[in-house]
Image (cartoon, rainbow, N blue to C red):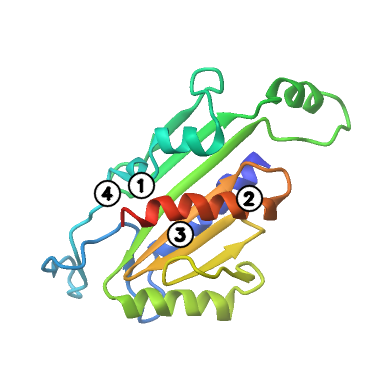
Amino acid sequence: MRIAFYISVLSAATLFSCNSGSVQQRDTARLPDQAVSDTSSTASTQRNNLWKDHGCELITDAELVQLFGINPKEDVLNSRTLPDQAFCLRTWNKPDWRERESNNEKEGAQWFDPQNRLVVQVFGYLTNEQSKLQLAQLRRDRRNTYEEDVQNLGDEALWSTNTETLLVRKGHLVLSIALNAVDTPHDNLPKAKELAAIALKKM
């Protein structure tokens, strides 16, 4: 399960960092009001990155602690970033992590994840229209994965139960919240929406 979660996160990063048809994007957020500059021989352009190397500021440790009732020391709250990206991975132990690990060691037992994980990313596009087209493409080509439209969040939002990921568009930016904190995948959506609301106020 843990490996599957990381694979889903990497898949999302690959999806948004690669060009798709005429929609060119980067895996970092960009300021909408700053001048663009040439970045390749094809004269693709990108705005300066607002959240690069600051991904964990979109949702701070303090905000996460308050929302989930985490004891940072006892629950072993960890934060990790990736260089030159708007990315933040946080892990912390579930309250019954010892029992889960003991159960997982039993032969034939159902495996239960002893950790909670949250991955926050921001993907930036050159224009609002490009980000809008990207979500439209997901609805068209990957509806079996991003099966649910989420109302009243950003400009538009999609949820994937399979990857436990919430995508929220705000202007030319797409916020990705991948949350694995509840054993039933769809039950992660309410908290993912709360986390997105916190981040959107800063974007």
Earlier sequence position, callout 3 versus callout 2: 3
117 lies left or right of 184: left
Q: Nearer the viewer, mark 4 or mark 1?
A: 1
The amino acid type of the residue labelled 4 equals Lys
Q: What residue is disc 1 on? A: 58
Task: Kindly indicate whether the residue at mark 1 contacts the one at mark 3 (C-beta within 8 angstroms).
Answer: no
Task: Kindly indicate whether the residue at mark 2 contacts the one at mark 3 (C-beta within 8 angstroms).
Answer: no
Q: What residue is disc 4 on? A: 52
- Disc 4 and disc 3: Cα gap in Å? 17 Å
Q: What residue is disc 2 on? A: 188
- Disc 4 and disc 1: Cα gap in Å? 11 Å
Please identify the quarter of the rendering in which residue 26 is found.
bottom left
The amino acid type of the residue labelled 3 equals Thr
- Disc 2 and disc 4: Cα gap in Å? 26 Å
Quadrant of the frame with the C terminus: bottom left
Earlier sequence position, callout 4 versus callout 1: 4
Q: Residue at x 30, y 42 (%)?
A: 83
Earlier sequence position, callout 3 versus callout 1: 3
**Front-most of residues 25 and 183:** 183
Query: Residue 14 — which label?
Result: 3
